[in-house]
Amino acid sequence: MLRLFLLTLCSLIMNTCPGQYNWKLATEKNGIRVYLSDVAGSDFKAVKVECVLTGTYTKLVGILTNVSHFTDWVYNSKTSKILKQINPLDFTYYSVTHMPWPLSNRDLVIHMRVKTDSLPRYLTISGTAEPNIVPVIPVYVRVTHYKASWKVTMPTAQTIAISYLLEVDPGGSIPAWAANMFADKGPYGTFSNLAELLKK
């Protein structure tokens, strides 16, 4: 009886946790699944991507740390450059994202960290906004809220399983309802491009 009570209590705590997501499948194509969820305290939906791609940790890390080539695969990326590098797996970069007319392009500063355990059995990548490192550029809208995380494992010697989570507020005057209508398009495009790049 006590065990049942404790299980029920734990379930209630988990279900009322402020970080709780309620994922709904938005896109499933070519082995890439994109989910959307409401976020407490935000009008913009969170995004989760799940996929198994051909590739290895080494290839993925090589792509993620080659910042100047983000324009090759990150959806609507206009330019990216390293600002500060602590080491090859811990750095801060500046990026500009193209937005369709009449919207202004967005720029953001992201601190990215790549970590793995010693075996390695898994890979984790985090990206957080550090908007105050670079002065605001009037022609762009600065993105001040950005939080991304990757959890990557290798089911086989030549495949990687990725679970990617993103929360972002694009800022400016974009209505939330309009942004949410296309919230799955960018992540799907990015991971489709990544899949092709990993095969090369």
Image (cartoon, helix red, strand yellow):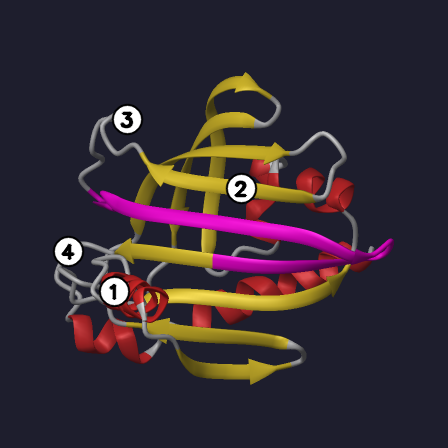
Q: Earlier in the sequence, mark 3 or mark 2?
A: 2
Q: Residue at x 22, y 35 (%)?
A: 137
Residue 172 rendering spot, x and y as whole percentages: 15, 56
Q: Position of residue 9 (x, y in %)?
A: 25, 64
**Residue 174 visible (yes or no):** yes
| 24 lies above or below 55 | below
Q: Pointer 2: what residue?
A: 125
Instruction: Identify which amino acid the numbered label 4 is placed on.
Output: Gly
Residue 25, image x, y percentages: 44, 82
Q: Quadrant of residue 179?
A: bottom left
**Quadrant placement of the N terminus:** bottom left
* Number of numbered discs on residues: 4
Q: x, y percentage for residue 188?
A: 52, 71
- Give the quadrant of residue 94: top left
Which residue is labeled 1 in the image? 9
The quadrant holding residue 92 is top left
Q: In the rendered image, which residue does mark 3 sit on? A: 134
Q: Are marks 4 and 2 in contact (CB under 8 Å)?
A: no
4 or 3: tag closer to the N-terminus: 3
Tag 3 secondary structure: loop
Name the residue at 19% across, 77% down: 177
- Mark 1 and mark 2 lie on one chain; the one further toward the N terminus is 1
